[in-house]
Amino acid sequence: MNRALADAYPDAHCELDFTTPLELAAATILSAQCTDRRVNQVTPMLFAAYPDAAAYAGADRHELEEIIRPTGFFRNKTSSLIGLGAALLEKHGGELPATLSELVRLPGIGRKTANVILGNAFDVPGITVDTHFGRLVQRWGWTALTDPVKIEHAIGELIPRRDWTMLSHRVIFHGRRVCHSRKPACGACLLARDCPAFGTGVVEPEAASKLVKGVEAPRLLRLAGLDEELAESAADTAEPVEPAEPEPAGSTGPPPEAAEAKSAGDPR
């Protein structure tokens, strides 16, 4: 299945836009309970206004909140960004550290965010256990564990370390495009033959093909062995990838990453 995923998603990547490690850290903090697409709409203004740790540390709280308001939980996220900037200035010379143990001690950064940063900004292999990753590896029978840290360790034992980051991207890509939470496209899945959860979703090929999302849909349908007519049709009808429903913009509850950051022990 890992090899099939590699063939299916050779260009899988982090879908948050960034150019520096700090930009990725900020974007990942904003992505809690928000779609990557919405985050990418907000970050150009954010990155222009706050280009470094000093800018975040000295930010006017109201101005920062207004910029990131569309991502939801904006008050908590503002606290994380200001705290992150201050901590980087105080402890790391304004630069983001490149180790898991140091990253998880920073405001707003839990283990999942740290692995995103390590794998994509520093080329340090890491497994990102988001909701898509956790759901799929359980469906596939790779692990029965539910705790994200335990899942990370268990999958790390199955897959060579050099492949951890790309595996994360490929599994997340597949979860967003084919193996959906409520209605997976089982009948149009290239992993169907090896998947122990086949039948959880729509099995009839034509109906399943309509559930496959993204510009990759025609290619994914061909890899799944569906006829050319369905693959051609998908080029015009496939819905864009939208990984999650965003939280209401006025929500003030704590994002999951905030809770994760408080209990992010056991750095690997």
Image (spheres, rainbow, N blue to C red):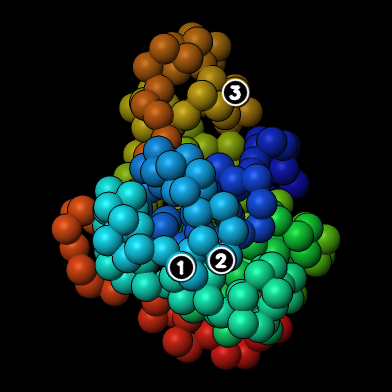
Q: Identify the mark nearer the N-term, 3 or 2.
A: 2
Q: Element type at marker 1?
A: loop
Q: Quadrant of residue 239?
A: top left
Please state, as top left, top right, bottom left or bottom right, where the C terminus lies in the image.
bottom right
Residue 165, horizontal then vertical, whole percent: 70, 57
- The residue sitting at 39% across, 76% down in the picture is 258
> Would you name the residue on which mark 2 appears?
54
The label shown at residue 157 is none
Secondary structure of the residue carrying numbered label 2: helix
- Which residue type does callout 1 highlight? Gly
Where 238 falls versus 61 (above or below)? Answer: above
Which residue position holds label 3? 219
- Relative to 190, say whether 150 is above or below: below
Mark nearer the viewer, 3 or 2: 2
Residue 58 tag number: 1
Task: Please name the residue shown 83% across and 61% down the image.
Answer: 162
**Label 2 neighbour load within 10 Å: few <14, some 14-19, many 20+:** some
Q: Are marks 3 and 2 in contact (CB under 8 Å)?
A: no
Marks 2 and 1 in Cβ contact (< 8 Å): yes
- Which of the two residues, 122 or 244, is positioned nearer the viewer here? 122
